[in-house]
Image (cartoon, rainbow, N blue to C red):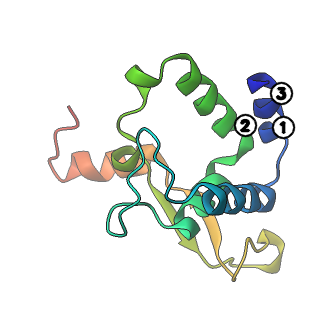
Amino acid sequence: LIESLLSELEALEPSELGERVALAFTKHFGVAARGIDWRPDRHTPLPLLQGIAACVGGRVLSVVFRALCMDYRHLSGGLPDLLLIRARRPSSPEEGDQGHGAKWEVAPANEWLGSSLAAGVDPF
């Protein structure tokens, strides 16, 4: 069952991932679950979750979810601190539009790390 769901997730387009996130968010909002805090000032807003899903894509999400299924305790920490995404307007019509004129992309880790190191931040 889990493998079939992960395979299905891998094949989804960014817009389909956003729709899937919205359905799950709406269906499960407020339900007690490990690792989720539904208080208004604590939970991640739906548009941001949709952007993250569209940004990283189904293949990466399926890899992450598979790993969490195998070792949740060890791998579940760190996401809010380690994930950087940004929204930008498409510079040309060919780039496409992922909703409301914004295009989501993962901020390259090396770009962020390089800037942090240049500023004297110790990454460890």
> Residue 40 sits in which quadrant?
bottom left
Residue positioned most to the front: 31
Q: Is residue 60 left or right of residue 15?
A: left
Amino acid found under the numbered disc labelled 2: Arg
> Residue 43 sits in which quadrant?
bottom left
Residue 35's x, y, as percent?
40, 41
Residue at 72 percent of width and 76 percent of height: 99
In the foreground, 101 or 72: 72
- Decide: marks 3, 1 in contact (CB < 8 A)? yes
Residue 89's x, y, as percent?
63, 79
Residue at 61 percent of width and 59 percent of height: 25
Residue at 38 percent of width and 44 percent of height: 82
Identify the disc placed on residue 8. Answer: 1
Of helix, strand and loop, which one carries label 1? helix
Amino acid found under the numbered disc labelled 3: Ser
Number of the front mark, 2 or 1: 1
Q: Residues within 10 Å of mark 2 (few under 14, many from 20)?
A: some
Amino acid found under the numbered disc labelled 1: Glu
Residue 64's x, y, as percent?
58, 32
Query: Measured along the vertical axis of the image, is residue 69 above or below residue 29?
Result: above
Label 3 belongs to which residue? Answer: 4
Residue 59's x, y, as percent?
73, 37
Q: Is residue 81 left or right of residue 31?
A: left
Which numbered disc flags the more N-terminal residue, 2 or 1?
1
In the foreground, 65 or 104: 65
Gap between marks 3 and 1, in whole Å?
6 Å
Quick one: quadrant of the C terminus? Answer: top left
Of helix, strand and loop, which one carries label 2? helix
